[in-house]
Amino acid sequence: MEQGKGKTPKLFICTVIENKDEIEERYERAYNFFQSLVVDCSEKEAHDALNNAVCKNHEDVSLGMLMSILSEPQNAVKCYRDLTLITRDGLTCVLNNLSNLILERYLKFQDTTRNQLLWLVKEMIKNAVNGIDSVCWNLMRYASGGDVTSKNIFLVESLLDIYIENRSWLDKFPVLVCMVVYTYLRLIEDHNIPHLMTLRQKEVNFVLALIREHFNEVLSLGRDLVRLLQNVARIPEFNQLWQDILSNPKSLSPTFTSILQLLQTRTSRRYLQSRLTPDMERKLVFLTSQVRFGNHKKYQEWFQRQYLATPESQSLRSDMIRFIVGVIHPTNELLCSDIIPRWAVIGWLLTTCTSNVAASNAKLALFYDWLFYYPEKDNIMNIEPAILVMHHSMRSHPAVTATLLDFLCRIIPNFYPPFADKVRQGIFNSLQQIIDKRVLPNLQPLFDSPKLDRELRTTVRETFKEFCNNGNEVGEGVSGVHEEGIEDISRGGPDEPAFSDDEDEVTPNIGEDTDDDDLPLSEVRARERPELAAALPLLLRPYAETLLDERTAEAASALLENCSPPMPTPAALADLFAATLQEVAPLKITMSPTPSEIESVMNTPIFPLFHQLHKEASEVKHKLILETLKEMYVQHAVPNIGYSLLFYLKACYEKKKRAERDAAKKKGVQFKSDIYREYCGFLELKLAESIADDFEKCQESDANVLVWLIPDVYREFRDQVQNHVRLMHIIVSTLDAGQLQRLVCLTLQGNLMMFKPDNITTLLSTSLSWETFEQYCLWQLLTAHEISVEDVLPIIPKLSYKEHAEAVTSVLLMLKQERPTAEVIRQMFCRTLDDEDSFVVSTVMYWCQDYEDKVADLLSVLLSTRYPGTSPNKRKRPGKHSIPSNAPPSAELVLGHLEQIRMCCVEQDDLSIFNMECIQKALQQSQSNSSDTLKRQYGDLFSLAWEDELPMLRRARKLASNSLPLNQNLHSSNEDSEEEEIVKPKQAKRRKKAISDSD
C-alpha cells in the first residue's frame, strides 16, 4: 500500500482564530501513526505491519484508517478493505467513534468529509456491518426541517437514495424504519417548492411504501404520526392513505382498529428529539437549564439569528415546542430555581413567529398532548407548559393568552368532529390534572380575566363551565373551604385568589402593564403571591398572616396548635407553608454544630410540622400534617422536606440524650426513625430511594448537614442503605478531606457501618466510573471498614490500569497486606495482558520478597492446570491449592503474565523463582503441550526450562531420597499449611522431592 507523504489532511473546517481541539488532535495523531506503518510499503508489508500493530494498539490504528477514509477519497477503497480485514471487534470501535464524530462535529465537516462519510455508510450497509443502523440514526438528525439549503438537501437526498437502494437491509430494523418515516414525513412538508418537487415525489413514494408495508411497526410512533400526516394530507397519495386510516383501518393492519388507537399513544421522546439537530438540542437544553430568568434575552436573540432567521425555518418552531414539551422535563430543584422556565421559552417561540401557518402548527404542537390526555398513561409535564404560558402571559402579553384560549376552545369541535367528545374529555382531564397536581391552584382567574374580550370570555365560560365557578367545584384549589369566606371575595374585579396583584385591588388598567421579561423570576413570583390566608378558616387567618410576615417556627407552631374543627384543607396549608418557605434560607451548620446552633437553625416554619408528628398529636391532626407534607411534596415547592425531617429527628434524639443523666437510660434513648418510615409510606416512596433523593437535595444545600446525618441514617436504616450505590455516590461526591476524616474516625470508633460484605461487588464495579476523589473517598472508607480482599477479588479482572487507576492503586495496597493464595493468583492472572499494566508483576514481585516458595508453588499449579490430563505423572496437591481445570485464566494469559514477570526478573538480575523445581516442571509441561504459535511467542520464557536434569543433580536427588525417611502421613497431615510453607520452605521442598522419587 502506498500512501502519499505530505501534509496531514483535515476533517474539519477551521478558522484562523480557532485552535485544534482534543478530538482533532487525537485523529491527527492516529492518522500519523497509521501513515508511519504503511508509508512506502508494499501491499503485503503494509498488511503485515497493520496486523502486528492492531494487536497492541487497535483503537489508534482503527481511528487512523477512519480518518484516511474520510479525508482521502483516492485511498478510501483500499483503506476500507484493509480495515475490514484487520479489525478485531467487527468495526465496533470505528462505529462508536463515527457516531461521536457525527453528533459532536458534523457541522464542522469539510465537504470532502461529508461525501466520504456517506460513501462509508453506504459501503457498511452493503456489507451489513452490525451497528451501522445507529450511525444512520445519528446522521438523520442532521437532515433538518425548515432548511432548504443545498447542503441540507444533499444530505436528505443522499440518505434517501441509500435507503431506497438498500431497502431489504432497512426492512430488518423496525426502529430505524419508524425513524425514517417520522423524519421524511416531517421533511416532505418543507419541500413544497418548485425546484424540490422531484425530490418530494421520491420521498412521498418511499414513505408511503414504508408505512403500508410496516404499518404495525409505524403504529409505535403514536399521536405525532397523526400530526405529521395532517401536514401532508393535501398530497393525493397521502389523501388516499387518510381514507384508508379513517374508513378501512383493517386494510392497513389486522390489529389496527381506528385512528383513536394512534391518538391515545404518546410518542416516544427519542422521535421528538430526533427532529432537532444535536447542536440545536444542546442550545435549548443549555437555555432551559443554565440561563437565569432576566438574563435570557441575549441568548434568545442569538438562537433566533442562528436557527430561525429564514421564512422556511418557521416550521422548526413546532419541532422545538414538541421537544421542550415532551423531552425537557426539569428536576424539582430546577423548577424551584431562577433558571428560565419552559413556559417562558415557549412563549418566546410563539410571540416571535412570523408565519400564520407556522403559528397555528406551533399552537397545535403545544396543546397536542391535551387532546387525548389520560392521566394513567400520559405525563403531566407534557401539559404543564401550555397552562403556564397562558397564566404568566396574562400580565404582560394578554394577547398570547387570548389566542391560546381561543385555539383551545376551537380545537374541540374542529380537530376531528366525530371525536369532539373525546377531545373535550381529554382537555377536561388535562385541566383537572393541572388542579389536582397544584400546577395552578385555581383556573377561574385565567378563564374569567377582564383582560380577555367579552366574546372570548363568554366562549371560554361556555366551553369550560365546570372550571369557571367560584371555588372550582370540580377541582377545589386554594379557594379551599366552600362554607366560609368565599362570599368575602368580590366578583366585581378580577377574581384571582391564586395569583393576585397589588394593582388588582382597583379597576385594572392594561396600559400600565409592564413587561416581566427583564425581571428576576423571584420578583415575578412575588407579584403573583396568592391570598393564602383567605383559603383558611376564619379562626386561623390571623395566624396565617403572622406566619407570612414573620416566617418563624414560633408563628408556625401557633397556627398548627390552633388548628381545630373546621380543619383547614391540606392543600390550603401546603400552599401557605410553601409560600412561607420560599424565601427561608436553606439548612446550614458548621462541621461540629453546638446545641445552640441547632436550635437557631430550627427556627424555621417547616419544623413545627414535624413536631406535630413527633409529639403524637390527635389522629385527625396527625393525618392532616401528613397530607399537607404530601401536598408540598407533590407541588415540588419545598425540595428539602425529607432531609429536614431527618435533621429534626436527629436534633430531637441528640437533645434527649443530652438531657438524660443516667448512662444506662441514655443508651436507651431511641431515634424515632418510624416517623420517617411513616412519611415515606404515606407518600408511597421506597425508603432507600427516598433517603437517596433527600441526601441528593441535602448535598446541594449543605455538605455539613449531610455528614452530620450519615451516622444516624446508616444506624437506623442499615438494611436499606448499606452498599446502596446511588447513596454512596452522593456521599463521596460531597465530602472534602476533613469530612472524610470525620467519617473514618466514626468508623474506627464503631459508630458507623456503611458497608456489608454481601453484594459489595456491584458497588465496586459501579464506582469505577466515578471521579478520582470520589473513588479515593470510597476506598478510604472501605479500608476503614476492613473489607476483606476476598470481597474485592471479583473486580480485579475488570480493572483497567488506564481507566481505573484509583481502584487499581487501592487494590494493590490491599494485596500488599495479604499473603498469596490460589484464588487471588487466579483472579490476578485473569487480567487482560498489556505491556504497560504492571499490576500482576508488582504484586507477585512484592510477595516474592517474603513468600517466594509459596508464590512459585501457586504459579506452577496454576500453569499446570491449564493443561488438564496431559501429564501422566501429575502431582497430587492438597485441595486448597487446586484450581478447576475449566476455570479461567487461559493458558495464554498465564504464559503472558509469566513472561512479564520474567522480563522484570531479568531487569533485576534475579531469576531464582524460575529456577525452582515446581516452576521448571510446569514450564516443561506447558512447553510440551503448547501450540507452535505459543512456543514461538513465549520462546524466551520456555528457554528457562531445563531440558534435562544434570547428572550431579540426579545423584544429589538420589542421596537426598535415601537419607531422608519418607513421611507416611504426608497426605493426611496438616503440615502443608500456609504457615508451615512460609516458616520452613526448604523442608517443604525436600518433601516434594521425596514424593517425586517414590512415585
Image (cartoon, rainbow, N blue to C red):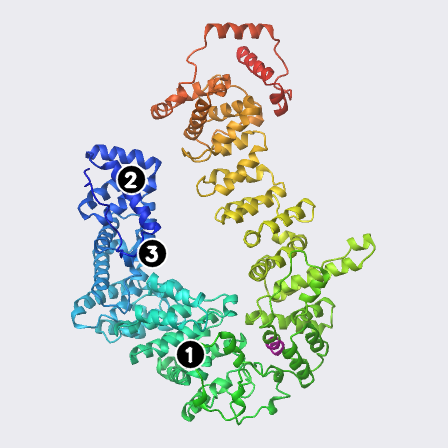
Distance (Cα) linking label 1 and label 3: 43 Å
Secondary structure category for the residue under label 3: helix
Q: Amino acid at mark 3?
A: Glu
Q: Taking 775 as reference, is 971 above or below it?
A: above
569 with respect to 899 (left or right): right
Indicate the amino acid at tag 1. Lys
Label 2, residues with CA under 10 Å away: few <14, some 14-19, many ≥20: some
Magenta-span inclusion, residue 968: no
Kindly identify which residue carries mark 2: 33
Front label number (1 vs 3):
3
With 710 as the anchor, is 368 left or right in this view? left
Residue 140 image position (x, y, % from top left): 29, 60
Could you tell me which residue is drawn at 43 percent across and 74 percent down?
343
Quick one: label 1, few (<14), some, or many (20+) residues within 10 Å?
A: some
Q: Looking at the picture, does residue 482 appear above or below residue 747?
A: below
Q: Earlier in the sequence, mark 1 or mark 3?
A: 3
Q: Which mark is residue 104?
A: 3
Q: Secondary structure at mark 1?
A: helix
Specify whether residue 571 is painted magenta: yes
Instruction: Look at mark 1 in the image and give the residue it sits on.
Output: 422
Q: Quadrant of the N terminus?
A: top left
Do we see residue 265 in this rendering?
no
Cα distance in 3D space between marks 2 and 3: 23 Å
Judged left or right of residue 93, residue 162 is: left
Taking the image as shown, residue 765 lies to the left or right of residue 533, namely left
Q: Earlier in the sequence, mark 2 or mark 3?
A: 2
Please report the bounds of the magenta region as a residue range. Answer: 570-576
The single residue placed furthest to the front in the displayed view is 17
Q: Splitting the image into 4 quarters, where does residue 609 fall?
A: bottom right
Query: Who's the residue at 61% across and 47% down the image?
Result: 755
Mark pair 1, 2: CA separation = 65 Å
